[in-house]
Amino acid sequence: MTFSTTSVAGLGTVVVDGAGRTVYILTTGDHTNVPCDDASGCTKAWPDLPLPDGVTSAKAGTGIDASLLGTKKLADGETYPTYNGWLMYEFAGDGGPGQGKGQGIHSFGGTWYALMANGNPVSGGGAAATSPTTGAASSGAGTPGY
């Protein structure tokens, strides 16, 4: 599974999966990483991106900082790629590559955001976001504060 970046209208340059689809993260009001699971029905609208069997890591494509790619094994036993500690999902409402219709949607206990290449969530006003792994604050622009 390879991740890269591309320009998406209204969002700027964002992280996309190997099919060119925008990836999203789910955050709460305090900007922490919220898992989306099958039990809640969340993954029907926001498909998760488990690594295929036998694959232990994601690959960095164009525009991706390989040091920000990681993995997390969840209670379902599957291993998922992360970017700057964020679990990543697609949005079923995006009809294909180059779309960002999931940006800013409030559902499943939080708000969905696309990710910038520096690992920060895309936010309209550049509001501070907190890293899901370190708790460090970041401006959402410029160099990552994670």
Image (cartoon, rainbow, N blue to C red):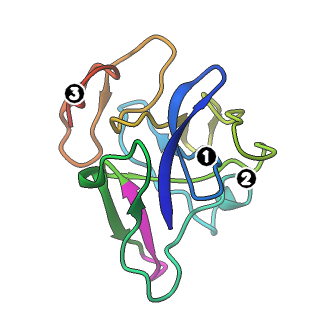
Secondary structure of the residue carrying tag 1 is: loop
Residue most extreme to the right: 95
Residue to which mark 3 is pinned? 137
- Count numbered badges in the picture: 3
Instruction: Tell whether 77 sits left or right of 8.
Output: left
Cα–Cα gap, marks 2 and 3: 29 Å
Which kind of residue does numbered mark 3 sit on?
A: Ala
- Point out the stretch of residues depicted in magenta: 75-82
Residue 23, image x, y percentages? 56, 47
Residue to which mark 2 is pinned? 45
Residue to which mark 1 is pinned? 108
Q: Are marks 2 and 1 in contact (CB under 8 Å)?
A: yes
Residue most extreme to the bottom: 54
Residue 46, image x, y percentages? 66, 53
Residue at 52% in and 71% down: 50
Residue 126, image x, y percentages? 40, 14
Instruction: Tell whether 86 sits left or right of 51.
Output: left
Q: Is residue 42 magenta?
A: no
